[in-house]
Amino acid sequence: PVAAAEATTQGLPGSSVVLVKDCDDGVRFVDAMVLAVEFVEECIILGRTKRGDSISTPSPGAGRPRANSIRSSMLAPLQNAWEELSIAGFDANQPAFAAVVDMHWWLSCLHTSAYCVSDLRPLAAALEEHIFDENEVIYSLELPERLSHTVHIARTAVAAPPPLIWLLEGEVEHCWNGHNLADCSHLADLQQSCGIRANMRLEKASLERSPVWQCLGPLRTTVAFSGVMGHAGRLVATRAGTRVALLHRARYTQLLRESPEAADLLNIYLTKKQFVDAARFYQTMGLQVWKRVISS
């Protein structure tokens, strides 16, 4: 499915828009990546990949109804989400507002029955916006001075976890930094088993100056953020004036105590987005996670 999605979107930037028609023959604009995910999904359901047939565009009306597909569930333009938040009284000039718009878009499209937009306010207030110079480090794990023994990076006491990071404007590179963390006992084995090289690029996000409702992210620090542990990646701004939205773990912990509904919305948003993204992009160490054998 990943290969098929890559083939479908080859040559198309992530912000590409495709003109399609819905069931009622009305014209809609759909993100190319979302369209690719649904296309792969339909091919699997129709059994074409299982039979080894060549993949071609499914004929109209073939297979299951399109009403419940990922694509048709997310037809609402992102600008609509911005307008809905403005009507609900959110301040479009507040820091990191584009990340709030992204959360609202995903939740209103894929969590409709249980979502109340007012629950998003405490989460929006917990976000920060920062501007970084070229080559300025956004996050890099800093261990205490030379330890007398090796430690596991999953230990909460090792270092502060990374924040959740959304790119608002500029460019960010996310590279492997585990080779510089010799005191973390298992990272060398992880590098070898997963084929990771020193300074290997894990992600790159680039976003030109865009409308206030657009952002990219969150970048792949979610596991370490959720687990309250160090992260072996190093995130650097590679363009002057790079703007990012940040949610630090301490603010999230405060959110858990004071606004559990908002914290729950964040987890739902992250999980839904990560699940959909798993079919969109190749992810370093992803196959090892998805294909692991569960045993006692």
Image (cartoon, grey):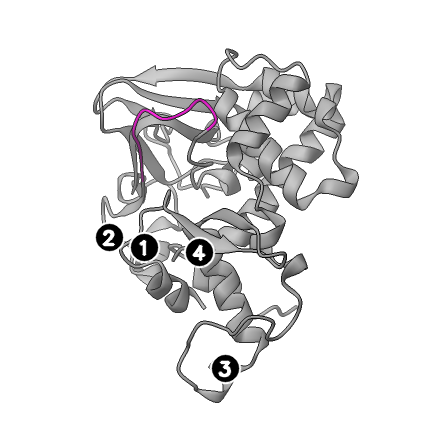
Quarter of the picture holding the N terminus:
bottom left
Classify mark 3: residues with Cα within 10 Å, few (<14), some (14-19) or many (20+).
some
- Residue 221: percent from left, percent from top: 45, 38
Name the residue tied to disc 1: 191
> In this orientation, which residue lies closer to the viewer: 196 or 235?
235
What's the residue at 41%, 57% (across, down)? 285
Q: CA distance from mark 3 to mark 2?
A: 37 Å
Type of amino acid under label 3: Arg
* Residue 11 part of the magenta segment: no
Above or below — where is 180 with respect to 263? below
Classify mark 4: residues with Cα within 10 Å, few (<14), some (14-19) or many (20+).
many
Name the residue tied to disc 3: 48
4 and 2 marks in contact (CB < 8 Å) = no
Sooner in the amino-acid sequence: mark 4 or mark 1: 1
Above or below — where is 173 with respect to 45? above
Sooner in the amino-acid sequence: mark 3 or mark 4: 3
Q: CA distance from mark 3 to mark 1?
A: 36 Å
Type of amino acid under label 2: Arg
Specify start and end residues of the magenta stretch as a single range: 205-213
Q: CA distance from mark 3 to mark 4?
A: 19 Å
Magenta segment, prevailing SS (helix, strand or loop) = loop
Q: Nearer the viewer, mark 4 or mark 2?
A: 4
Quarter of the picture holding the C terminus:
bottom right
Q: What kind of element bears circle 3?
A: helix
Q: CA distance from mark 4 to mark 2?
A: 23 Å
Q: Is residue 294 left or right of residue 248?
A: right
Classify mark 1: residues with Cα within 10 Å, few (<14), some (14-19) or many (20+).
some
- Viewer can see residue 247: no
